Image: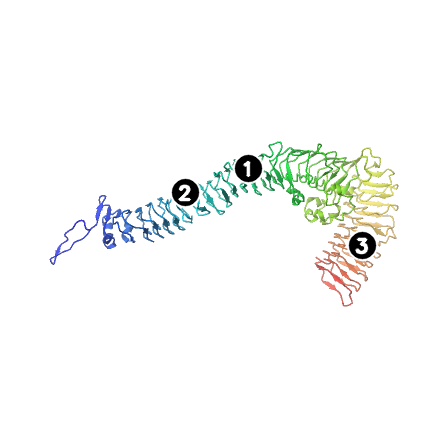
Amino acid sequence: MLNHLTFQGLLCSQIKLKCEPAYEDNGQTLVISSSSDLTDEILLSIVTTKNIQKLAIRISDFTDLTSLSAFNHIQNFDFSQTSITQIPPNCFKGLKNIKNIVLTSSATSIRAYAFASSSIESVTASQIVSIDDHAFYQCSNLATIDLSHAQHIKDFAFTESGLTSATLDSLQELTYAFYKCEKLTTVTLPETIEVNSQLDSTSIKTITLFNIGYKFYIDSLVELTLTGTEIYFGYSLPKLEKVKLTNPDLFSVSITEQMVLHTIELPESNILSACFTLNPKLKTVTNGQSIRSLATDAFASCTSLETIDLSNVDQFETDIFLNCYSLKTIHGFNDVESSQIVLKGAPFKFCWNLKITEISEGKFNFFYDQYIMNNPISNAFAYTGIEDLTIKYYPETGLYFYGCKNLKRVDMSQLTGKTYLPKYMFRDCINLDTVIFPDEVTSIHYFAFENTKLTTLNLKNIKFIGVFGFSNCNVQELTMNYNFKIADSGGFIDECVERPDKMENYDYLEYEKMINYERINDGNDYPNEHMRHYVTPFWNCKMLRKITLGSEVTSFSLKYFPNSTITEIVLDNNNNFVVENGILYDTTKTIIYAYFNTQSTEFTVPDTVETISPFALAYSPYETITVPKHINIINGLFAFCHKLKEVTIQAKINRLGDYTFSHCYNLETINFAEGSSLISIGHECFICCYKLSSLPSMENAISLGNYSFAYCTSLTSINIPKVSLIPSFCFWHSNIAQFTFAPTLSIVKDNAFNSTKIQSFSCPETLVYIGVGAFANCIKLTSFTYNENNKITAILQGVW
């Protein structure tokens, strides 16, 4: 209704009246009491000419609000005395003057884009139930709005707004309504809401939640309080420093991969499962005694964790503390006289500060399944920080300290009831320099002390030693009282039998994996695949200088000490040998067992000598050797004479045995007595004779051995006109290009010419068999001929 009339003029006997709304607040508030006044025709000129700051609609039955151009000039709106139920879509969108709006209690809905990109600062509304998408999009000045009754807020409703806090007590589902609300610091949610990444891209630093999902993520979060009974999240929160769990009924928790998390507070409860993997800054876990069970990898890579109370945990799974470099104390485990915690696998791998000093029966409980028994690096104390250890007991399944790089001293003098030390027991304990062996132990399994720092070995009671038992050690002095028997069995060492010169059954040692280790490196920069048959307990003990032989030693061979330079052999109450001028003889001086004089480069066998044992000259400095007529050329006579250049054999010979010149890297010349005619060449006879460029006549040879000429890289041709069978790997990796074969050649075994320089091959009519890989990797082979008269019955896979 009009409040007053103004006479405008009198024309043609008619009076024209103009209606104006009422004003309040000194004319800054425009009051509308009639719906007919809500038009741009009436309002626009008024609000632009009278500097109206506030529009108040006082129409109790007014329900349908529409957008007017006049709204763009008004800062404040009061709809508290209307019956409006919603703010329609786009109603105040883009308005740059709007600041405040007061809604009636009947207003329950704000529709899409209602205030989008506007300058709205506050919305007073007590009963808003739903807010549509983008309703306050880019409302950067909006700081507060009552959302306590809001049940539905759609995606992006407040995106890029200035909202600082939101209390959402009635919310039914959390959406991405607050995406990129960079001023939002406080949010309160009901317990029923599951939170994942919906609150990401806000400025929330602290929050209390009940229910979080696996994808929970708030990039700004620093401190998190969780009140639920089951907690699980693994997305990395870049700023999260502290997590507090408060529910006394908490039964399961998993908080992983938090890069800066330093504190986890647990309630006093019975937590049935806990996992805190990959929290590298985690230092404090309060009430750890609440934990009853730990998941696999529970504290893996918690590299800053030093102390934790796990006194109520009954089992440690493998890798549970993997990479906990700083861990020193586990209350209930290494700070008690007797721990009831079952150790399964390798729970402490790479815990370099975790130390124990004694292992006795009943102190620890060990559990091993078949996998763990076969994998020593998966053992309880493998790769830990033990420094000084007394061992009084170990379980029947074995105990391994594989890779304990800080371990320096081990005392096993009080160990009873054990006759062997298990495989891998101290392998890669690179600083271990002192070991006191127990008197009852007579067997040391393979790899037991490989890569340790032991300098003195007193093996007076040891009868069996596994291959690589002491390889790559710094051993300088060795005492032995029995003939060593070298382990060649997959079982425990006390089941082993004496090893022959050549190890026939070696597959169980996983040779292909071991080949990469330095132990297979002979120090001469040559290929090492061919070394597999010569592995010994003392492989690559380059510092070994002195060996003492006790009274029970009746045989001795240098084959067990490859790459060492023995300068002294001492007899301790031993009447089975004589040492003279750097030579170990039998008591009659007719047999040479070992030559260890490192001064001379020439050697002529003394006339009194009748036999030179295999490997007796191995690793010697001789460049020339003359062998008298009366000496038989036996297997391995010159094997491993790395510096040998020339050999003169004065006796007529017709055969060379197995590995006669094996690994004579510098051998160039072999002088045979006139009338010698070779008919047989043994296995590995010339293997790795890298500089041997010519051979004595092979025209009468009828038999060759496996690997006979393997790695003879200076040989370019060979004439074998009577050999009917080419054995396996016979010319493997040699550089022979020209072959003269027997017309009766019948069999070419596996890999016989593999990786040679052979250029052509013509199958004789007698050839019946070509084995696997016989000509594989022969990159120069351009011609392979056979005809219809050939009798070949088998050409196996991979021949070429």
> Hey, which residue is sitting farthest bottom in the picture?
788
Amino acid tagged 2: Thr
Q: Residues within 10 Å of mark 2 (few under 14, many from 20)?
A: some
- Observer-side mark, 3 or 1, equals 1
Of the numbered discs 2 and 3, the one sitting upstream in the chain is 2
- Residues 212 and 510: in front is 212
Whole-percent x, y for residue 408 in the image:
66, 34
- Residues 727 and 65: in front is 65
Counting every numbered tag in the picture gives 3
The image's colour scheme reads rainbow
- Asked whether disc 2 touches disc 1, contact meaning CB atoms under 8 Å apart, the reply is no
Of the numbered discs 3 and 1, the one sitting upstream in the chain is 1
Decide: is 658 above or below 415.
Answer: below
- Asked whether disc 3 touches disc 1, contact meaning CB atoms under 8 Å apart, the reply is no
Whole-percent x, y for residue 316 in the image:
60, 40
Name the residue that disc number 3 marks: 704
